[in-house]
Image: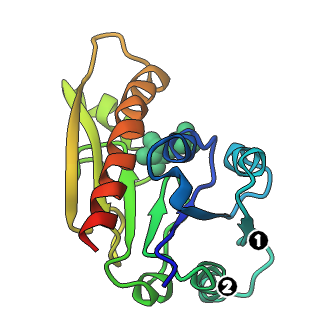
Amino acid sequence: MNGGVVVLASGTGSLFQAILDSEIGPMVCCLVTDVPDCGAVEIARSAGIPVQTVTLTGRLSRDDWNRDLVTAVARWNPALIVSAGFMRILGPLFVDAFPNRIINSHPALLPEFPGAHAVRDALKAGVTRTGCTIHFVDHGVDTGPIIVQESVEIEPHDTEAELHERIKAVERVLLPATIKQLLQSN
Ligand code: GRF
């Protein structure tokens, strides 16, 4: 076991950057992405972190993609796999390959507002408070055991982008701190 951290990301990568900039940055051994030209890939390249790209397009099946994802991650034998803005649902094939080793950061107070549009859904629902959740990944969509949550107030005229940015500011602190704790308790 190399005890490192594999990060999964497919977006701008600001959470990935926050992990790299934190105390546990040196533990990150690889970025795995499904989007070859996303911001997270640029961040990895500048930081000299290996990138493995496993795209979904052109595949026979999701199982096929999940199998390749398992291969890409397993070669690092990581202590922890961190989904930090990875926008695909991880299938049972992947989840079962790494029991209790996959965590996800989600921009809402689960079980409220699971899914890909959590910030928009919170605004639409008219709640006054949302936040972020770090949880273990299970077979459901954002349903796994919750590790930690932090709330964020919704301001009266918040746009989705403004609110999401304030949530991400919290995630950028909470996610590296949670990874550190989990690695220490391993
Ligand atoms: C975060 O809000 C994360 O919870 C969600 O996607 C966002 C990733 O942001 N799943 P970034 O690409 O790291 O800036």
Q: Position of residue 153 (x, y in %)?
A: 22, 22
Q: Taking 83 as reference, is 121 left or right?
A: left
Query: Label 1: few (<14), some or many (≥20) within 10 Å?
Result: few
Residue 111 visible, this orientation: no
| Looking at the image, residue 69 lies above or below residue 42 | below
Q: Residue at x 81, y 77 (%)?
A: 58
Quadrant of the image containing the C terminus: bottom left
Locate residue 139: give its quadrant. bottom left
Judging by the rendered image, the residue that carries numbered circle 1 is 57
Q: Is mark 2 within 8 Å of ligand 1?
A: no
| Looking at the image, residue 126 lies above or below residue 139 | above
Residue 97 visible, this orientation: yes
- Disc 1 marks which amino acid? Thr
Q: CA distance from mark 1 to mark 2?
A: 13 Å
Q: Residue at x 59, y 88 (%)?
A: 63
Q: Are marks 1 and 2 in contact (CB under 8 Å)?
A: no
Question: What is the secondary structure assignment of the residue under circle 1?
Answer: loop
Image label count:
2
